[in-house]
Amino acid sequence: MSGHSKWSTIKHKKGKEDARRGQLFSKLARAIMVAAREGGADPGSNAALAAAIEKARSYSMPKDNIDRAVQRGSGEAGGDTFERITYEGYGPAGVAIIVEVLTDNRNRSASSVRSVFTKHNGTLGQPGSVAWIFERRGSVVVDAGRYSEDDVMAAAIEGGADDVVRDGEAFQVLCEPAELSAVREAIQQAGIEYEQAELTLQPKSTVQLDEAEARKTLRLVDALEDIDDVQDVYANFDIPEEVLQAVAG
């Protein structure tokens, strides 16, 4: 599991997003709306929508909010028009960073993202400059303290997953994006509760950071995630467990 995946899991467990729940729900709703608009309102035939709904549920977003976002995205209840924009750049120690945005104002988003990169000693790159380092994957995270690797592996294989990676206190089940729903359901049917299930960008190679570099990089990532238009931030850093715990603490 990449260092950024571990960091995301720690933040998810600690509930740091609770202080920004209003902002978080707005971002989750926006992702649902766009997925419904692009692929239809049926999560059974729209993998992106199913993943967006599942992510919203993992953060305890109320069902009414989810249903309303689906209706707005499918045109049943009106709604704003958002476009997808991807920014690529570099952070401290040459860490590759991808920022995925859903926005109704391209100029505002570009200005906000550029400002954060500059403030935190990062650099925006040209389209394609770091995208080749990542690949789109389905990811299901399971608490390794509660379940055995054999049980998780058996369920993952049953669902059609490609790999199960152990890292510290978690298993990350990886699969093709289209198989995420089937893998998630297989894990549930095996009686295993998962912590996160989402579409993600998985780095093919990573940059290991020391504590000073980790603090700088995570400040940049957190600042990017605080931008209203930003949906997801992906980076190819890897942080040793003891360093990550020190930083998280």
Image: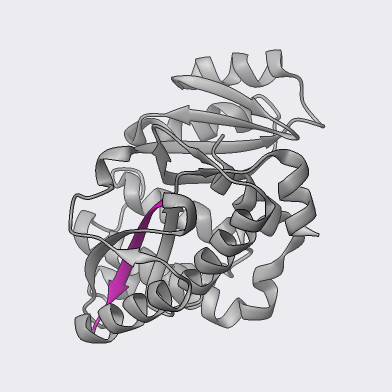
Query: In this orientation, does residue 204 appear?
Result: yes
Instruction: Please determine whether, in this image, residue 157 is positioned above or below residue 224.
Output: above
Residue at (66%, 24%) from the top-left corner?
190
Q: In which quarter of the view is residue 79 placed?
A: bottom left
Instruction: Please determine whether, in this image, residue 216 is positioned above or below residue 190.
Output: below
Q: In which quarter of the view is residue 125 placed?
A: bottom left
Q: Position of residue 173 (x, y in %)?
A: 54, 29
Horizontal side, residue 89 vs residue 234: left or right: left
Which residue is at the front of the view, 216 or 59? 216
Residue at (59%, 46%) from the top-left corner?
209
Q: Position of residue 31 (x, y in %)?
A: 37, 65
Instruction: Please determine whether, in this image, residue 29 is positioned above or below residue 10.
Output: below
Horizontal side, residue 64 vs residue 244: left or right: left
Query: In this orientation, does residue 77 appear?
Result: no
Which residue is at the front of the view, 137 or 249? 249
Q: How is the image coloured?
A: one colour
Q: Main secondary structure of the magenta part?
A: strand
Q: In which quarter of the view is residue 22 placed?
A: bottom right
Residues rendered magenta in the picture: 96-104
Question: Which image quarter holds the N terminus?
Answer: top right
Question: Which image quarter holds the C terminus?
Answer: bottom right
Query: Quick check: is 147 in the magenta stretch?
Result: no
Horizontal side, residue 168 vs residue 96: left or right: right
The total of numbered circles placed on residues is 0
Residue at (70%, 68%) from the top-left corner?
16
Q: Position of residue 236 (x, y in %)?
A: 45, 44
Instruction: Please determine whether, in this image, residue 214 is positioned above or below residue 202.
Output: below
Q: Position of residue 85 (x, y in %)?
A: 23, 66
Residue at (77%, 50%) from the top-left corner?
245
